């Protein structure tokens, strides 16, 4: 499985979403561009743009610092916080307890939701179940790779 | 009337067999858009897809006050239905079609989609707190059904999509009342205390003088507050069953807030004087919501859930509640600013005590 610090990891999540429309259909279509920022203590931060549309996610791309402001909203946190979240997903076949993306961003100690426009941040709440299902795809990928 | 089919002219009868006059004008197609064919998007044929030509023109002041469909050939003597909300800015929001489609796509069922069978026995204090919270929520959610219903029949049918969106809100809120009532009863607990302060707040919203004032109180303030309570569901839900309830309800609530924010923005943009009326409503409403948020029953129930039980209420429950209150009112003030309202100078909310950093706001708006 790809490291979560690789764009390929997010491409795998997007592929999983695109290949399983039935899983996402019950949640409804999504129209949102969401950024992910992972701060790396080694200075190699990763910024990924996830363009969600309809029942899928078009190709994720990397962004330069500052380009996240072009997204409806973005989630940012230390690499360690993201690793903990994805490990939890892989262990439980989906996020549990306070490792759901909604929990993490609510407390905001490790991962925060940001946006230039409050309406963009509200999109994160409007499509929250789909975002969670997207991240939970990491659990399915881990299963298929094990 | 004669109907031409290919090279054949067919004479059509002018009277029915009972002697009633017959009208064949519709066979000619009354509007110039006849033949226009909208293209479905990937998700199907949406309201945005069919908003073409005159069908998609939302007039500021529609000519008629009837239920005649926008874009049809309408009789000049079509009856006046007594609508009082006849200006676009009184009901419209630029995102309303998108939100309607989103609402239709994201409906869920409290009966089918919540794994009720997976509820488990909880410590007594947690079960009581959850039941108390659900008692408040099932009570207050119906205001967001009653209020749009009160105003919808006074809205000009020209603004059909706004009425359709509000219909989805009514269904959403009925479902919220339903799901919190079910949760209160489902685990052997029950409905607990309903206190008069809650109903005073609800009456205040219901009695707003104008729809835009009502929308500011309901969508911007009230639902914004409840949206954040549902977000807290992630922290207060004792099991995955309640988590799912809160998450699904949160998505619904966020749509309602998105409509209200953009509706208020539209109303103020069309008439800046409208802002003062909205401010007045919010001056009053903020006090009432602060009272609700700090009410002895609701605040204690939330604190117990946040603390995971009464044992840690002082070292975990109340401090976490303070942190979340700061987030709730920060989000509210940001939405006000997006709606074109600058509440910073005006609000009676204890911003300093809440620890809200005012530098994060542009403090623009009316």
Image (cartoon, coloured by chain):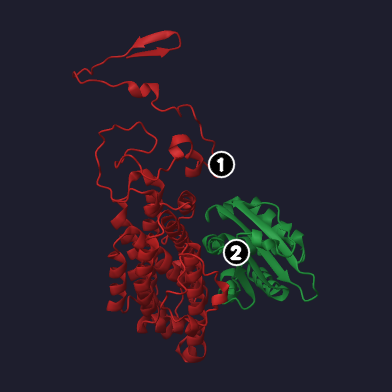
Chain colours: A green, B red
Q: Is residue A48 visible?
A: yes
Direction from residue B159 to residue B154 in the image, left or right: left
Q: How many marks?
A: 2
Above or below, comparing residue B166 to residue B244 in the picture: above
Question: Residue B114 at what x, y percent from top left?
Answer: 46, 64
Direction from residue B156 to residue B314 in the image, left or right: right
Which dot marks residue B296?
none
Specify few, some or many for label 1: CA neighbours under 10 Å numbering under 14, 14-19, or 20 or more: few
Q: Which residue is mark 2?
A: A116
Above or below, comparing residue B332 to residue B300 in the picture: above
* Quarter of the rendering containing residue A65: bottom right
* Quarter of the rendering containing residue B179: bottom left
**SS class, disc 1:** loop
Direction from residue B219 to residue B204 in the image, left or right: left
Task: Between residue B193 and residue B196, name the one nearer to us.
Answer: B196
Residue at position x 45%, y 74% in the image: B345
Residue at position x 52%, y 81% in the image: B323
Pointer 1 indicates a residue of which chain?
Answer: B
Question: Residue B33 at what x, y percent from top left?
Answer: 46, 29
Q: Which residue is mark 1?
A: B41
Pointer 2 indicates a residue of which chain?
Answer: A
**SS class, disc 2:** loop
Question: Residue A67 at what x, y percent from top left?
Answer: 70, 61
Are labels 1 and 2 on one chain? no
Of tags 1 and 2, which is closer to the observer? 2
- Quarter the C terminus of chain B occupies: bottom left
Instruction: Name the outermost residue toward the front.
Output: B273
Residue at position x 79%, y 70% in the image: A44
Instruction: Name the outermost residue toward the left.
Output: B18
Question: Residue A120 at what x, y percent from top left?
Answer: 56, 61
């Amino acid at each position: 499985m790809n490291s979560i610090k690789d764009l390929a990891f997010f491409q795998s999540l997007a592929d999983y979403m695109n290949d399983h429309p039935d899983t996402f259909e019950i949640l409804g279509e999504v129209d949102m561009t969401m950024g992910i920022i992972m701060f790396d203590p080694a200075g190699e931060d990763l910024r990924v743009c996830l363009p969600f549309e309809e029942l899928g996610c078009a190709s994720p791309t990397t962004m330069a610092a500052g380009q996240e402001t072009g997204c409806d909203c973005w989630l940012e946190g230390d690499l360690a916080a993201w690793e903990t979240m994805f490990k939890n997903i892989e262990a439980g076949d989906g996020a549990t307890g306070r490792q759901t993306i909604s929990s993490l961003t609510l407390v905001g100690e490790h991962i925060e939701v940001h946006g230039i426009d409050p309406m963009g941040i509200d999109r994160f709440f409007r499509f929250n179940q789909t975002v969670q299902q997207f991240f939970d795809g990491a659990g399915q990928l881990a299963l298929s790779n094990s | 009337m004669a109907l031409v089919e290919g090279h054949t002219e067919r004479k059509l009868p002018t009277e029915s067999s009972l002697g009633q006059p017959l009208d064949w004008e519709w066979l000619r197609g009354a509007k110039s858009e006849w033949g226009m064919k909208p293209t479905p998007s990937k998700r199907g044929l949406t309201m945005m897809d069919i908003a073409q030509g005159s069908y998609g023109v939302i007039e500021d002041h529609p000519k008629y006050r009837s239920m005649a469909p926008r874009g049809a050939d309408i009789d000049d003597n079509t009856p006046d239905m007594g609508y009082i909300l006849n200006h676009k800015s009184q009901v419209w929001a630029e995102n309303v079609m998108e939100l309607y489609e989103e609402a239709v796509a994201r409906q869920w069922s409290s009966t089918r989609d919540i794994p009720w069978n997976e509820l488990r026995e909880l410590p007594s204090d947690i079960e009581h707190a959850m039941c108390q919270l659900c008692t408040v929520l099932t009570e207050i959610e119906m205001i967001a059904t009653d209020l749009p219903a009160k105003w919808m029949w006074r809205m000009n049918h020209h603004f059909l999509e706004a009425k359709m969106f509000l219909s989805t809100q009514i269904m959403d809120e009925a479902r919220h009342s339903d799901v919190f009532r079910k949760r209160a009863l489902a685990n052997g607990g029950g409905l607990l205390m309903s206190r008069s302060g809650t109903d005073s707040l609800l009456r205040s919203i219901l009695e707003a003088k104008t729809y835009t004032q009502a929308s500011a109180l309901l969508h911007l303030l009230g639902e914004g507050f409840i949206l954040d309570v549902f977000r807290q569901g992630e922290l207060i839900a004792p099991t995955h069953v309640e988590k799912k309830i809160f998450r699904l309800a949160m998505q619904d609530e966020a749509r309602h807030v998105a409509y209200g924010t953009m509706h208020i923005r539209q109303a103020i943009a069309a008439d800046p004087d409208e802002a003062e009326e909205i401010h007045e409503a919010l001056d009053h409403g903020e006090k009432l919501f602060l009272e609700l948020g700090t009410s002895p029953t609701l605040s204690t129930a939330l604190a117990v859930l946040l603390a995971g039980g009464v044992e840690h209420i002082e070292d975990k429950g109340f401090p976490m509640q303070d942190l979340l209150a700061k987030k709730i009112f920060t989000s509210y003030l940001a939405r006000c600013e997006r709606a074109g309202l600058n509440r910073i100078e005006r609000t009676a909310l204890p911003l300093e005590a809440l620890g809200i950093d005012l530098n994060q706001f542009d403090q623009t708006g009316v």
